[in-house]
Amino acid sequence: MTTSTRNNGLWPEFVKALKQEVVPALGCTEPVSLALAAAMATRELGCVPERIDARVSANLMKNGMGVTVPGTGTVGLAIAAAVGALGGNPDGRLEVLKGLTDAQVEAGKRMIDDQKVVLSVADVPNILYAEATVTAGGRSARVCIADAHTNVVLIERDGQVVYRAETKQGAQAENYCLDGACAQDVYVFALTAPLSMLDFMQEAAELNTALSEEGMSGRYGLHIGATLQRQIEAGLLSDGLLTRILMRTTAASDARMGGATLPAMSNSGSGNQGIAATMPVVVVGGHVGADRETLIRALVLSHLMAVYIHTRLPKLSALCAVTTASMGAAAGMAMLLGGGYPAVAMAISSMIGDVAGMICDGASNSCAMKVSTSAGSAYKAVLMALDGTRVTGNEGIVAHDVDASIENLGRLASQGMIETDTQILQIMLHKARAA
């Protein structure tokens, strides 16, 4: 790596990006965002609410309709709003539902049964938007979150504004800037920055490994990880590295989507993206006997590459973003398996040629299937890269340069899949009305 390719001026922004986008989250982050709004609104109200009115953007509705809320055994946004209001920690951010009691969950379910929780789609321009209004005794409080899962933009008490964010409508909530960065800058940072700047990333391995171990119990979601383990024992699968990558990565997603009360280390506002960027790297790190520093650097490369790619995408869209998080994992695995930057770039390009069309049809247990598919694609692309093979710039949306390929993927998600997103939501809402 020549000195000319190093852009050390970006390093503080890279650290800020990691610390903002790679954070613990308990449960699917879309319902959790609404739960946070409800918890903060209840604090503002100052008493137990008698009614909750929740409004969310269409994309947040799509991502919250089919996911189990941790600690409740119940699916959907209504229960998230109810338990957030009755038992959520308003200072907990993405861990707002940590520590829920059985009594609080039962009280939330009674509110829903009594039709005291009303949920609707908000007519707002924000792709990510959650609003909770709680009322009791003729008093009310309202909290609005927009553009990022914990970005509070408005707090009202009895119709009076208590807080309003000084940001433009629809603006992103990041306090970092990756303008001018390229994939190679991310690679150089991960491999050469002082370990003292990076060692906080070890928590990603710890949290997501614990979640994976919980998922291997077979009690959650589609129990795909546990199923793969049983098929190894039955002789239908080999106990090789690819199988272990799929099994351990998918098990973590099983647990997260199935309501396990353990946090995931998220990436770009998604626990599944955090799992996808973490577990393949952890499994390969164990396979090659990587020491602590090497594993941390591989995790930094994976997570930061995932963030870098995701900055080209909307916060929520019709493109399943575990694919882009798994592109980060491909980078981390390529590094651990002895490939340099060319192998990293080749693997990402091949993945763009492979899984760019995977849709997001809302958060649900089936997300674990998409996590499995993306992790498999990542490992396959790495093996191709190590053998000197890639999807070339002559094929499809892939360009000769990896950063151009990433830009093309971003345009596909931001512009080309808008109607797809609309159709997905309409199909899901039709199913919900027919149920």
Image (cartoon, rainbow, N blue to C red):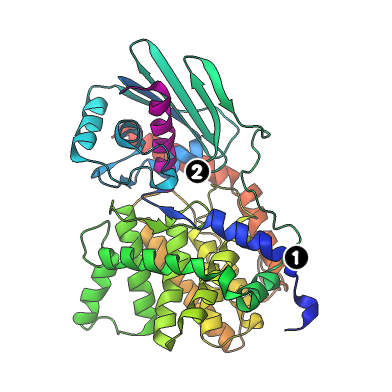
Q: For the N terminus, give its image quadrant.
A: bottom right
Q: Viewed as shown, does residue 410 lie left or right of 315? A: right
Choose top left, top right, bottom left or bottom right for residue 46. top left
For the residue labelled by badge 1, is the local secondary structure a helix, a strand or a loop?
helix
* Point 33% across, 33% down: residue: 78
Q: Which mark is residue 9?
A: 1
Vertical placement of residue 83 versus 8, above or below: above
Which residue is at the far front?
196
Percent position of residue 230, x then y: 21, 75
Mark 1 crowd level (few <14, some 14–19, many ≥20, 10 Å Cα): few
* Mark 2 lies on residue: 149
Q: Are marks 1 and 2 in contact (CB under 8 Å)?
A: no
Q: Which residues are magenta?
A: 29-47
Task: Specify the amino acid type for callout 2.
Answer: His
Vertical placement of residue 120 versus 370, above or below: above
Q: In front: 287, or 100?
A: 100
* Point 61% across, 84% down: residue: 389
Percent position of residue 300, x then y: 55, 70
Of callouts 1 and 2, the N-terminal one: 1
Q: In front: 363, or 262?
A: 262
For the residue labelled by badge 2, is the local secondary structure a helix, a strand or a loop?
loop
Q: Viewed as shown, does residue 289 lie left or right of 227? A: right
Choose top left, top right, bottom left or bottom right for residue 366. bottom left
Q: For the C terminus, give its image quadrant.
A: top left
Which residue is at the far right?
4
Choose top left, top right, bottom left or bottom right for residue 350. bottom right
Percent position of residue 403, x then y: 70, 67
Vertical placement of residue 99 versus 2, above or below: above
Which residue is at the far top?
138
